[in-house]
Image (cartoon, rainbow, N blue to C red):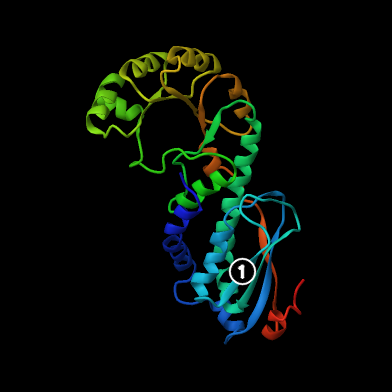
């Protein structure tokens, strides 16, 4: 599972990559209007209601860019439901670093907050069912740690993080092995006993084979509601049952009656719209007045 600590372990490397993508030699726009250090402040303003996620990443962009020359005063925390017009943070320090880091910091925050907001919406739609909502590996390259963290902030859970975490025998693995039973047997012979084995089943026959082979988790892939209910009955509690395939906020509520344990949703990370936030009101400020509290909004 991805929490704030595990995200922070990887964050610096990925943030630096994002900054390097945006600045290859210099920030020409900023350097043309600010030739030397100038202290200032700006407000992080929310422009629509949603769940905020990624505030530590937003702040870290400026910390890495300025080596301590920019501070971020948080007025919200990850997981908060925020509203239009709300000031989420105040950024203060070297205005050159604020201007250069603005877009990268906002890109992380908007993306992560959008995922958390969409996840929270789907979690609400599943309330009372006992069905756990989890993400998939359908993430943006080099953004997985942030996107899976955002799913957790929104109230969802994480499926495997990457290919090293667990065995998931999909259609092509099964085809390569010669069938479900052969694929599960091969996985059991190869993997440590601590590792779960999941089988993707497209038919009821594959479900029967997966149960007989001793799979720990059976994923019902793109089945009809009637097929899924029959599959749950066939499994009979001998394995966890996961639902997968084109799940969105528009159709997830119908899955509450299936009787499965988990629903995985690629849309959480590949289709969630951003949450609109902006860095506004950048202005020069006398640092002595600021630290004396005279500039407080």
| Residue plotted at (30% across, 29% down) | 173
Q: Residue at x 60, y 55 (%)?
A: 110
The x, y position of residue 4, in whole percent, is 51, 53
Identify the image quadrant of the C terminus.
bottom right
Above or below: residue 283 compared with residue 210: below
Quarter of the image where one finds residue 159: top left
- Residue at label 1? 72
Q: Is residue 153 above or below residue 250?
A: below
Classed neighbour count for the residue bearing mark 1: other residues with Cα under 10 Å, few (<14), some (14–19), many (≥20): many
Choose between 286 and 225: the one closer to the eye: 286
Kindly give the residue lying farthest to the bottom in the view shown. 36
Q: Position of residue 66 (x, y in %)?
A: 52, 76
Return the x and y of residue 81 as percentages of the image width and height: 69, 49
Count of numbered marks: 1
Q: Left or right: where does residue 31 sit relative to residue 5?
A: right
Identify which residue is drawn at 67% across, 83% down: 287
Give the x, y percent position of residue 243. Answer: 50, 26
Residue located 54% across and 38% down the image: 267
Instruction: Give left or right: position of 40 versus 157.
Output: right
Q: Secondary structure at mark 1?
A: strand
- Going by the image, does 206 lie left or right of 242? left
Which of the image's four quarters has the N terminus? Answer: top left
Query: Is residue 292 or residue 220 the one in the foreground?
Result: 292
């Amino acid at each position: 599972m991805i929490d704030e600590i595990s995200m922070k372990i990887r964050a610096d490397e990925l943030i630096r990559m994002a900054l390097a993508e945006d600045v290859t030699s210099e920030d020409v726009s900023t350097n043309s209007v600010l030739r030397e250090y100038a202290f200032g402040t700006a407000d992080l303003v929310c422009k629509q209601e949603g769940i905020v996620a990624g505030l530590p990443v937003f702040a870290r962009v400026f910390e890495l860019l300025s080596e301590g020359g920019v501070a971020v005063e948080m007025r919200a925390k990850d997981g908060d439901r925020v509203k239009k017009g709300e000031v989420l943070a105040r950024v203060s320090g070297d205005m050159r670093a604020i201007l250069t880091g603005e877009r990268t910091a906002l890109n992380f925050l908007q993306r992560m907050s959008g995922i958390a907001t969409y996840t929270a919406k789907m979690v609400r739609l599943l309330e009372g069912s006992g069905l756990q909502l989890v993400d998939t590996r359908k993430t943006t390259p080099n953004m997985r740690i942030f996107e899976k963290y955002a799913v957790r902030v929104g109230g969802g859970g994480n499926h495997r993080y990457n290919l090293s975490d667990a065995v998931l025998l999909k259609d092509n693995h099964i085809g390569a092995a010669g069938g479900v039973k052969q694929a599960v047997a091969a996985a059991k012979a190869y993997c440590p006993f601590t590792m779960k084995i999941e089988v993707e089943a497209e038919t009821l026959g594959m479900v029967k084979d997966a149960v007989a082979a001793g799979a720990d988790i059976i994923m019902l892939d793109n089945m009809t509601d009637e097929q899924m209910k029959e599959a749950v009955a066939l499994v009979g509690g001998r394995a966890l049952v996961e639902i997968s395939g084109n799940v969105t906020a528009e159709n997830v509520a119908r899955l509450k009656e299936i009787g499965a344990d988990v629903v995985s949703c690629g849309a959480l990370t590949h289709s969630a719209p951003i949450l609109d936030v902006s860095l506004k009101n950048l202005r020069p400020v006398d640092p002595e007045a600021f630290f004396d509290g005279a500039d407080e909004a």
